[in-house]
Amino acid sequence: MIERNEKMKIRKLNSYKLFCFLIFNVLSSCGNKECEVQQIDKAIFNPINIKGDFIMVNQKDEIDTLKIEEFYEEFEKIQKRSLMVHQDCGHFFYYVYKFKGETISMDLEKNETKFIFKVTSLHMSNQYEINNSSKNFDKLLVTNGENCDESLFNKIVTKNFKVNYFLMKNGDKWIPKKFIQRKEIKY
């Protein structure tokens, strides 16, 4: 009987040692790393130029507003990785507009190697990657919605990380004519 109790104690001790070893390995694999990422230069992207509403005009001289709904900015120089957290380094912008009840969201991220710009609306999305050393930020980037019957948009065309114009399913082309800066936006 004593021998059996001792075997049980040894098994429990071995199980405890194994548990401690596993916990130690898991915790030691988690960590933080400082990155070499820099903030986005204001000459490339200035959030003041998008934190507001755009007065849009179409070819029929009709006027409507592309209204900013949300804006978010974060700059993170420390990469964090653990079982519960995965946070990359970078400078991040997220902004959402509404036009005629439909949402257009844009994400801009700069990491250590490239810019990633994503445009999303109902059933349409496109992601563009631009090398950090590139100076080609002013080319037109097109997000197509031709295959989505539910969207009002046929194409959303951006330039310099903001809306340049969009084409609607009814053939209207809406161009921003005036920008009205807003101070208070949801975050």
Image: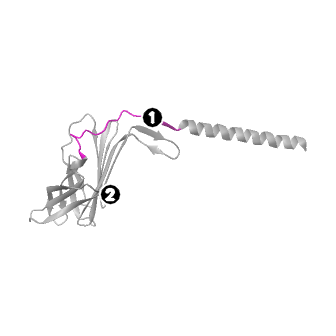
Q: Is residue 50 left or right of residue 89?
A: left
| Residue 34 image position (x, y, % from top left) | 42, 34
> In this figure, which residue is indicated by the disc labeled 1?
33
| Residue 67 image position (x, y, % from top left) | 23, 60
| Residue 64 image position (x, y, % from top left) | 17, 64
What residue type is disc 1 on?
Lys
Q: Secondary structure at mark 2?
A: loop
Q: Could one spot residue 148 in this view of the protein?
A: no
- Where is 127 relative to 131, above or below? below
Decide which of 154, 180 is in the foreground and name it.
180
| Residue 88 image position (x, y, % from top left) | 41, 41
Quadrant where the C terminus sits is: bottom left
Give the alpha-carbon distance from disc 1 to disc 2, as whole Å: 31 Å
Q: What residue lies at 23% left-to-right and 41% top-to-bottom?
A: 42
Q: Which quadrant holds residue 178? A: bottom left
Q: What residue lies at 24% left-to-right and 53% top-to-bottom?
A: 51
Give the crowd class for mark 1: few <14, some 14-19, many >=20 residues within 10 Å: few
Quadrant where the N terminus sits is: top right
Q: Secondary structure at mark 1?
A: strand
- Where is 1 relative to 172, above or below? above
- Where is 9 relative to 157, above or below? above
Q: Could one spot residue 35 in this view of the protein?
A: yes
Residue 146 in magenta stretch: no
Q: Which quadrant holds residue 181? A: bottom left
Magenta-drawn segment = 30-46
Decide which of 149, 28 is in the foreground and name it.
28
Give the crowd class for mark 2: few <14, some 14-19, many >=20 residues within 10 Å: few
What residue type is disc 2 on?
Lys
Label 1 or label 2, whichever comes before in sequence order: 1
> In this figure, which residue is indicated by the disc labeled 2?
186
Decide which of 31, 18 is in the foreground and name it.
31
